[in-house]
Structures are given as C-alpha cells and as structure tokens.
Amino acid sequence: MADTGAVMDIVILAVVIAVVVLGALGGLIVGSRRKKQLPPPPPAAPDITAPPAEPHVGEEAETPREEPRRTIEEVDLPAGAGPVVIEEPPAAEAPEIEIPEPTAGRLVRLRARLSRSQNALGKGLLTLLSREHLDEDTWEEIEDTLLTADVGVQPTQELVDRLRERVKVLGTRTPAELRVLLREELITLVGPEMDRTVHTENAAGGPGVVMVVGVNGTGKTTTTGKLARVLVADGNTVVLGAADTFRAAAADQLQTWGERVGAHTVRGPEAGDPASVAFDAVKEGKEMAADAVLIDTAGRLHTKTGLMDELGKVKRVVEKQAPLDEVLLVLDATTGQNGLVQARVFAEVVDITGIVLTKLDGTAKGGIVVAVQRELGVPVKLIGLGEGPDDLAPFEPEAFVDALIGE
C-alpha cells in the first residue's frame, strides 16, 4: 500500500509539473504575440482648404533679412555680357526676277530648229522644180509633197497653178531662179499682209485682255506663261488669271511662270468657278494699271458641248469688266488636219483672233500654218519651237519660208 501511494504521489507531482511548464510556455507565446507591432494607419487626406505649411529652414540657414528691392536698371550684368539681342528669323527670299530676251529676231534665232523639221518640204519642192522636164507627173508629185505637209487642198492647188504659170511664162530654170520663185509664192501663200500683232492695247485705257483657249494637252498653260515672257520682254506689265481650276497643278504652274518675270497671278479655289477667277483677274489688272491680263482657261475637248458652253460663259463674264482684245487658240502642230476640226468648234463658241502653233519643231507638216489660217480666216501669231522658256516666237512669214527652203 505504501508503494502504491508513493507512485500516486509521483504521478500527481509529474502532472503538476507538466501543467506548470505548459502554462509558462503559453504565457511566453501570448506575450510575444502582444509585442508584435501592427502596421501604421494610412495617412489622413490633406485638407485642401488649409493654407500651405511654411517651408522648413535648415539649422545652418540665416534668418532672412529685409533688403531694399533694386530696379532692373540697377542690376549689373555679368562681366563681359552685352545687351541681349533677339534675332528675327530670316525673311523668305523673293524669287529672282528674270529678264527675258527681246522678241525681235527670235524666230531668226530659232530658224535652225524649224529648218531641220521642215527640210523635207522645201528641199523636195526645189528638187522637183529643178527637173529637166516638168511634165504632169512632176506637177502631181509637187502637189503630193504639199498635201503631205498639210498645206491643204485649196491652197495647194493655188500654189501649183501659179508656179506652173510663172515657170511657163518666165522660162525660169536655174536653181537660184527657182528658189527665188518658190520663196515668193510661198510667202504669198502664207499671207504677209495679215496683222500678226498680239494686241494688248485697250481702247478704253485699261489693260489689254487676252484669253488663251484650246483642247487638253496642247500646252495652253505653258504657252500662257511663255506669252507673259514675250510681253514682259517688250516692256509690258502683266497679270495672269489662273482660270484652269479643274487641273490641280495648273494654277501652281502658271504662278511659277509669273514669278519668274514678276507677273502677278490671280487664282481661286481648286474646282472653283473659272469665270469668277477670270473676272477677278481683269478687275485686279485694272486696279494695278497693268498693260495686259492673260487668262489661262481649262483644256476642253471640242466634242464636249457642256465644257464649250462654259468657255462661252467665261468670255461673257470677262467682257462685263473689259472687252476682250485677243482670243488665242493654241493648237498642237503635230496633230495636223485634226487640229482644224478643233479650230472650227472653238471658233463657233468664241471669236478666235489668232492662232498659237506649238511643237512646230517636232513635225514635218509645217503647211498647217497655211491650212489653219485659211480655215479660220485669222493669222498664226505665235509659234512654239522648243521646250525652253523663250522658245515661243512671233510668227514672221519671210523667216518661216526661209527656214522651209533653206539657204
């Protein structure tokens, strides 16, 4: 019994010790949890109505002192510094104004180009006329040569008849005599009595008004720009009207031509009313006391009735400001007889007063000069003989014929 009680005492003691140990460990764990720091609370939102806090001043900073304020004149600039200069951006340079060469003798200078393209006509006629026997076959060959050069049926018949009569009556046979004879007859055929002046004098005292018309691709805008150079070279002041509003680059192209010689360009919005631009151009030309106003119109297909009617409208609107002194029809000489069809239609819509033949140096059909004059009853006033800015020349019948038949 004594042993059993001792064992029980030991067990009880062990349980008590275990309870004490477990209690101590639990206290340590709870204490450590209580000592763990919680995260700081989020900062409070600033009060936007409160005045801003004064800035903190470091311990080394001096206490600010009250000093009298100085004016800007009393403040000294750093040593070596000069007055501040504000540089203005450089102004855009105006394009250099070109001085076109005088128009007098221009066709003589360009005669070599003309003679190269028309050489076959003149040489062919002289060769045929120099044959020992001028029989019917030879005269037929002469007719064919003239027709091939687009002289036209009626003018060709007239020329051959006169040549046959003079050769028969005068008995002209030497090459030199034949050349003189042919030159005289060709000049007569071309029409030396026609007035080929580009009129820029207005009877009312204002600027002369010139309208340039033609089909697409004949070089109207370029011709208008070159014509401005011709007039400036002869001492005139020029205003350009960019009434071709349907082709985006036309107004820019014409303005570039004008800037080269100091001509003012009047233009309107793209796809705007061409008649309005033409009206404004004449109005500004009068206000500027210009000598001439050149109006570039849009290229029109001679088969399109609506476009041709619009051209008539441009003419009528311009004439409300001033009378038209010239209506120049630009024809491509390389089109030959097709150009005559175009000429007829344009002549019905506007009163053509003169012809400008472009690309005459690129065709052997120089006889178109005679044919178109006969068709319209108006003179060829200007001819284009190249791509250069001064390759538009006043038409001179004698120089033209001399280029045809050579020296």
Image (cartoon, grey):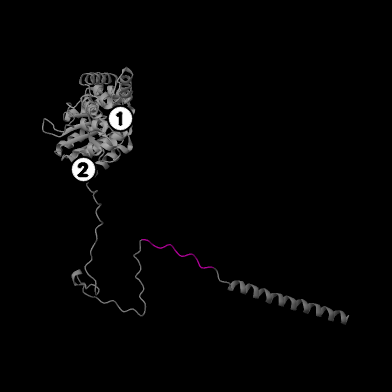
Q: Indicate the amino acid at tag 2.
A: Glu
Q: Is residue 60 in view? A: yes
Is 396 or 350 nearer to us in this picture? 396
Name the residue at 84% across, 81% down: 6
Residue 285 location (% of width, % of height): 17, 37
Q: Which residue is mark 2?
A: 101
Residue 365 location (% of width, % of height): 31, 28
Is 99 or 155 nearer to us in this picture? 155
| Vertical relation: 250 (above or below) 158 | below
Element type where label 2 sits in the image? loop
| Residue 47 counted in the magenta span | yes
| Residue 195 counted in the magenta span | no
Count of all numbered marks drawn on residues in the image = 2
Is 13 or 407 nearer to us in this picture? 407
Q: Quadrant of residue 83?
A: bottom left
Q: Indicate the amino acid at tag 1.
A: Lys
| Vertical relation: 57 (above or below) 110 | below
Q: Which residues are magenta?
A: 39-48
Side (left or right) of 50 relative to 297? right
Prevalent SS, magenta region: loop
Element type where label 1 sits in the image? helix
Residue 262 location (% of width, % of height): 21, 44
Q: Residue furthest right?
A: 1
Q: Which residue is mark 1?
A: 123
Pick whichever of labels 1 and 2 is earlier in the sequence: 2
Is 256 or 40 nearer to us in this picture? 256
Disc 1 to disc 2, C-alpha distance:
32 Å
Name the residue at 35% across, 63% down: 50
Q: Quadrant of residue 406?
A: top left
Query: Quadrant location of the N terminus?
Result: bottom right
Residue density around tag 2, few if under 14, some if 14–19, many if 20 or more, within 10 Å: few
